[in-house]
Amino acid sequence: MLTSEQVRAARMLVRWEQRDLAEQSKVSLPTIKRLESKPGTISAYETTLAAIRAALEAAGVEFIPENGGGAGVRLRKEAP
């Protein structure tokens, strides 16, 4: 499960515009804009969510699940 807030925050961590996420995930720019515009859990096809998540994870983002403190994102620690 992804929220629009997580996707926007993840994009900011890797310094991507919506267009960059669209290109990397192969999801259309209008779809990215629509999904990010509505607060809360993203309602989309599972393949669309998987593509967005995979693109952001490949760029170094880790998605943090809800654990009482709220779902979030962070950059993956690089191996030494």
Image (tube, rainbow, N blue to C red):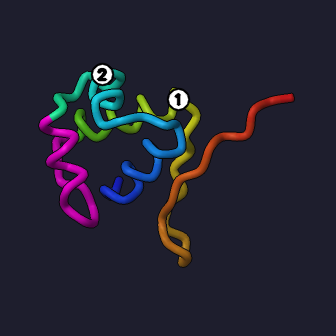
Q: Which residues are magenta?
A: 30-45
User: N-terminal of the two: label 2 or label 1?
Assistant: 2
- Gap between marks 2 and 1 measured at Cα: 13 Å
Which mark, by number, is residue 30?
Answer: none
Label 1: few (<14), some (14–19) or many (≥20) C-alpha neighbours in 10 Å: some
Percent x, y of residue 68:
54, 78
Q: Is residue 37 magenta?
A: yes
Q: Quadrant of the C terminus?
A: top right
30 relative to 72, above or below: above
Task: Check disc 1 and report its element: helix, strand or loop.
Answer: loop
40 relative to 50, above or below: below
Which mark, by number, is residue 59?
Answer: 1
Which mark, by number, is residue 23?
Answer: 2
Q: Is residue 13 left or right of residue 46?
A: right
Q: Residue at x 19, y 44 (%)?
A: 33
Percent x, y of residue 17:
36, 35
Q: Quadrant of the N terminus?
A: bottom left
